[in-house]
Amino acid sequence: MGIKVKVENVTKIFGRNPKSILPKIKKGTSKETILAETGHAVGVNNVSFEVNKGEIFVIMGLSGSGKSTLIRCLNLLNKPTEGKIFIDGENIIDYDNKQLKEFRQKKVAMVFQHFGLFTHRTVLNNVVYGLEIRGIPEEERYEIARKTLASVGLEGWEDKYPNQLSGGMQQRVGLARALANDPDILLMDEPFSALDPLIKREMQQELLDIQSRLKKTIIFITHDINEAFKLGERVAIMKDGIIEQIDTPDEILAAPKNEYIKNFVRDIDRSKILQAKNIMFKPSALVSIKDGLKIAIKEMEQSGISSIFVVDTDRKLLGLITIDDALKALKENHKLKDILIHDYFTTGPETYIQELIPMATESKYPIAVMDEENRLLGIIVRVSVLSNLV
Ligand SMILES: Nc1ncnc2c1ncn2[C@@H]1O[C@H](COP(=O)(O)OP(=O)(O)O)[C@@H](O)[C@H]1O
Ligand SMILES: [Mg+2]
């Protein structure tokens, strides 16, 4: 895996004499007091984190919490007042102009909330721009630009101008422009915040698809906790320039570090309208008690699953067996009914996801969704609970 980005104790203060403010910050003087007394704005306060190669790392926080200030430190659009930023082991703050130029042209690319496209250039020429700057020969840069546009679903739109495109499509151009240089690192500052909810979801999915193909290192900023949890392998939650918690969505849900974060997590819960029936699916395999052990084992092996629900002829749920128990039972001549276990969670179809979260995080087995007659309607696996928190 390897660490791609390592941010060490980065602080960014805005004002006439930023360095003079450092001692105050270290003493713990609040952002408000510093602003009131000195006129300096604390953008980022002693932030440290690491991003793994190929990871989607999300920075989440309310407006004014310092997200943009922080991400702009990563390509030195903001020079940190203090701290170090290592990319591939090199402290970029030590770069001279030439190194910095090369770093910005080749290693990182940024996608902005308001797209930042050239209105007087066609879609194709917007994407070509960065390649032009890098001095890529004309024919080659047009070829790359066309390919990249096609990869974000914009084939056929090359000769349009940005204002002829919907917001979602304009942001696809923004994404294509960033990807055209084939950077290792994508910096995305609230790229989908200006989009309608439906388009936003579509773009989130698109980004995940692109990421599964390209495996970039992505630092993604949002003020939307649902978006953060959908996209982020790990999420950093910021408040007043400070990172309050860095964990996986799973870990944050299970153990929010303080009241502030609990409130965000509660926000998710309140907003939940999805119910078990919306996210359950038909089990890929199921056995009837009369089928017996051998069939059960075959079903599990064929579907690549380690446990399977057992029903009677009316589809009433009798229990669950695991592949390990089943193989052992077969050797020892036991019957399927002897190895049924019952320590899985069950729920009705109307249960809200928020109530399923604790079950999903605790249980080794899928959750069984049953009707009132105890018939199995569907199953819910842990990952679909967590990935449906949007
Ligand atoms: N160029 C600037 N000059 C002065 N203060 C700034 C500047 N940029 C950001 N800030 C301040 O830094 C803090 C964080 O802002 P920002 O990083 O834009 O937050 P976010 O992106 O999370 O909304 C805010 O208090 C903001 O006013
Ligand atoms: Mg911002």
Image (cartoon, helix red, strand yellow):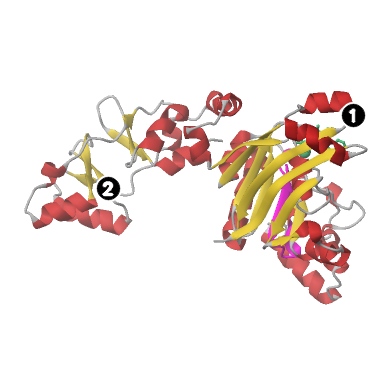
Which of the 4 quarters of the picture holds residue 30? top right
Q: Amino acid at mark 2?
A: Ser
Foreground residue among 360 and 313? 360
Q: x, y (%) of residue 146? A: 76, 66
Query: Which residue bears the numbered disc 2?
Result: 307
Query: What residue is rendered at 31% in x and 52% in y?
Result: 305
Image position, residue 145 (x, y; %): 77, 66
Q: Which residues are magenta?
A: 176-194
Q: Is residue 390 left or right of residue 59?
A: left
Q: Relative to the observer, which residue lies in front, 130 or 39?
A: 39
| Residue 247 sits above or below residue 135 on the image | above
Q: Give the quadrant of residue 210.
A: bottom right
Q: Position of residue 6 (x, y in %)?
A: 66, 54
Which comes sooner in the sequence, label 1 or label 2?
1
Query: Can residue 169 be seen in this snapshot?
Result: no
Q: Which mark is residue 39?
A: 1
